[in-house]
Image (cartoon, rainbow, N blue to C red):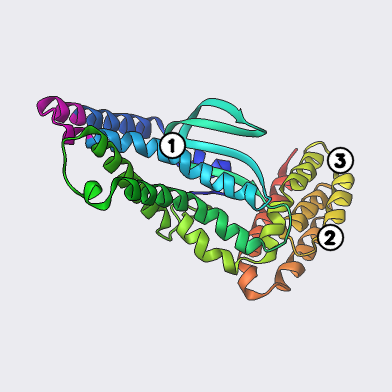
Amino acid sequence: MRLPDDEDLAGTGPRSKEDRIILFIFCGLLGGLMAAEVLYDGSPQRLAIVFFLAFWVVLTVIHEGGHAIMAKMVGWDIDEIQLGFGRVVGEFQVGATPVRLRLFPIVGLVRITPTSLHFPRMKNMLVYAAGPGIELGLVALLTLVMGWDVMTTPTDAYTVILAQSFALAGLVGAGLNLIPFSPHPGAVTDGLGILLSPFLPLSHFETQMLTPALERGESLIEAGQFQAAIDFFDEGLAHYPHVAILRFGRAKAQIHLGEYSSALLEFQAYVHGLPDAQRAESQLKLDELRTYIEVVKSAP
């Protein structure tokens, strides 16, 4: 799965002490039952589930690597790779790309920034498809080498059981990722990402491209340099007039200068001028802006 925000994945972990306890109990019971099953009957077939889970972790790394490799191939920047959910247990670099390893490495994400608006929808589709694609490609290659009959016939041979477990983990992982749905707000599976890519507005990719600049504008607001922030956002709007988040940042800076009505009316006029298909998301930002005004007004 490729997600747009690192906080999305971090938020999929257990959110309270009780959740964590339940998760650890569940994992302990599952591990205990697996161990008991293997000890009770140590035949090679019993080890298939252990191999399956081990290969699931390996294929998670390969899956996210597929997204990252394709992003590089189409010329987009890779901001970060995350493996797993829960708290961070390790960090390292692959080239210039930071990689975060979390407690349960069974899902992942790659944060990517487009570098141009040259065929962005097609490139986005390719990046989404690369994750499950590399898994299915490895399964197909393994089946070609081992033979269909060998891969589908029960056996006591450890080598074949390893190959079968790898193939099953790859098929299940790719299949789940290709189911088009949104597991939680702000996240989509690769299947849904592929289906949505041809219909994404250019403003979607413009917003992604401008993420570093948006962070710069926010830092100016946090530093109390409100007029400098307005000038900064105006410069961005001169090149990307349809990016709502630039207008939202400018409005926030205006609010801090006491220009409450101007900020609200200008953003409201922008939202009402949008096509119906693009208005819903910006309407949410308008509601957020109203709340922001009340927060600033009530601040000491």
Look at 51% across and 61% down and name the residue there: 194
Query: Taking 83 as reference, is 255 above or below it?
Result: below
Of labels 1 and 2, earlier in sequence is 1
- Relative vertical location of residue 86 with respect to residue 122 in this rendering, above or below: above
Q: Residues within 10 Å of mark 3 (few under 14, many from 20)?
A: some
In the picture, the disc for residue 225 is 3
Residue 57: percent from the left, percent from the top? 39, 36
**Which of the labelled discs sits on residue 239, or is there none?**
2
Q: Note whether residue 290 is visible.
A: yes
- Does label 1 or label 3 sit earlier along the sequence? 1
Q: Which residue is mark 1?
A: 15
> Which residues are the magenta region?
33-47
Q: Main secondary structure of the magenta part?
A: helix
Q: State the CA–CA distance, disc 3 to disc 2.
A: 22 Å
Q: Nearer the viewer, residue 261 or 149?
A: 149
Taking the magenta stretch, the answer to whether it contains residue 225 is: no
| Residue 144 image offset from top left, x and y in percent | 34, 50
- Choose top left, top right, bottom left or bottom right for residue 248: bottom right
Say whether residue 141 is left or right of residue 239: left
Q: Kindly tell me whether residue 173 is visible in this rendering.
A: no
Residue 260 screen position, x and y as percent: 80, 56
- Within the image, what quadrant is residue 50 found in? top left
- Residue drawn at x 58%, y 68% as measured from the top left: 198
* Label 1 – label 2 distance at C-alpha: 41 Å
Q: Are marks 3 and 2 in contact (CB under 8 Å)?
A: no
The amino acid on which the numbered mark 1 sits, given as a three-letter code, is Arg
Judged from the image, the secondary structure of the residue bearing numbered disc 3 is loop
Name the foreground residue: 88 vs 49: 49
Q: CA distance from mark 1 to mark 3?
A: 36 Å
Is 165 on the left-hand or right-hand side of 127?
left
Q: Residue at coordinates 40% horizontally, 52% vertically from top-left?
A: 136
